[in-house]
Image (cartoon, helix red, strand yellow):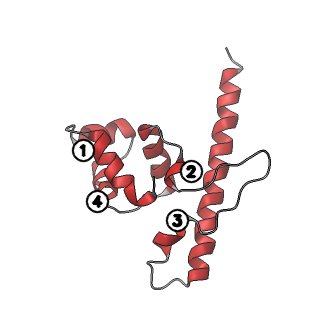
Amino acid sequence: MSLLRLGGLLRERRGGRGVREVATEIGISPATLSRVEAGKLPDLLTFRKLCTWLKVDPATILETPKETGSQPVEAPIPAAAVHLRADVLLTPEAASDLAQLILAAQRELARRTREQQNDVSTWF
């Protein structure tokens, strides 16, 4: 799976349901859903909501390897860098650095989510 397929995945999952209905279910605006379905990249918060709604691990869409043990496995070129490299104002190095920053934010978000889930599971 790839970030390039995110719009297609959303359209497939939405099926015949309306954009407004699904956007409300996801917690985003209909315009945002339409833009992402058309191939635009979402911001990180929207990306998280979309992944949750799709029931897909963000790492799968970003094509990042899973962490094994305590040491993360390094990917040669993050998929997110491909999109950033399309910006003619960014050098390839800057695009790669920004992609690494996005992936680090995604890992931190996943860590916090796991922490919150563990906290909630101790309530029961």
- Write down the residue under mark 3: 80
Graded by Cα atoms within 10 Å as few (under 14), some (14 to 19) or many (20 or more), the crowding at tag 4 reads some
* Amino acid type, residue under disc 2 in the picture: Ala
- Write down the residue under mark 2: 59
* Amino acid type, residue under disc 4 in the picture: Ala
Q: Residue at x 64, y 30 (%)?
A: 117
Sequence-first tag of 4 and 2? 4
What whole-number distance in Å separates the C-alpha atoms at marks 2 and 3?
A: 11 Å
- State yes or no: discs 4 and 2 in contact (Cβ < 8 Å): no
Q: Which mark is residue 34?
A: none
Mark 3 residue element = helix
* Amino acid type, residue under disc 1 in the picture: Val
What whole-number distance in Å separates the C-alpha atoms at marks 2 and 1?
A: 25 Å
Q: Is residue 80 left or right of residue 68?
A: left
Q: Nearer the viewer, residue 49 or 7?
A: 7
From the top left corner, tell me how far across and down residue 124 is, in percent: 67, 14
* Amino acid type, residue under disc 3 in the picture: Ala
Sequence-first tag of 3 and 1? 1
Q: Nearer the viewer, residue 96 or 33?
A: 96
Q: Nearer the viewer, residue 74 or 28?
A: 74
Of the residues tagged 1 and 4, which is closer to the observer? 4
- State yes or no: discs 2 and 3 in contact (Cβ < 8 Å): no
Sequence-first tag of 3 and 4? 4
- State yes or no: discs 3 and 4 in contact (Cβ < 8 Å): no
Sequence-first tag of 2 and 1? 1
Residue sitting at the far top: 124
Mark 4 residue element = loop
From the top left corner, tell me how far across and down residue 33 is, in percent: 32, 51
Compared to residue 62, the image places residue 15 above or below, namely above
Q: Residue at x 61, y 59 (%)?
A: 103
- Write down the residue under mark 4: 38
- Write down the residue under mark 1: 19
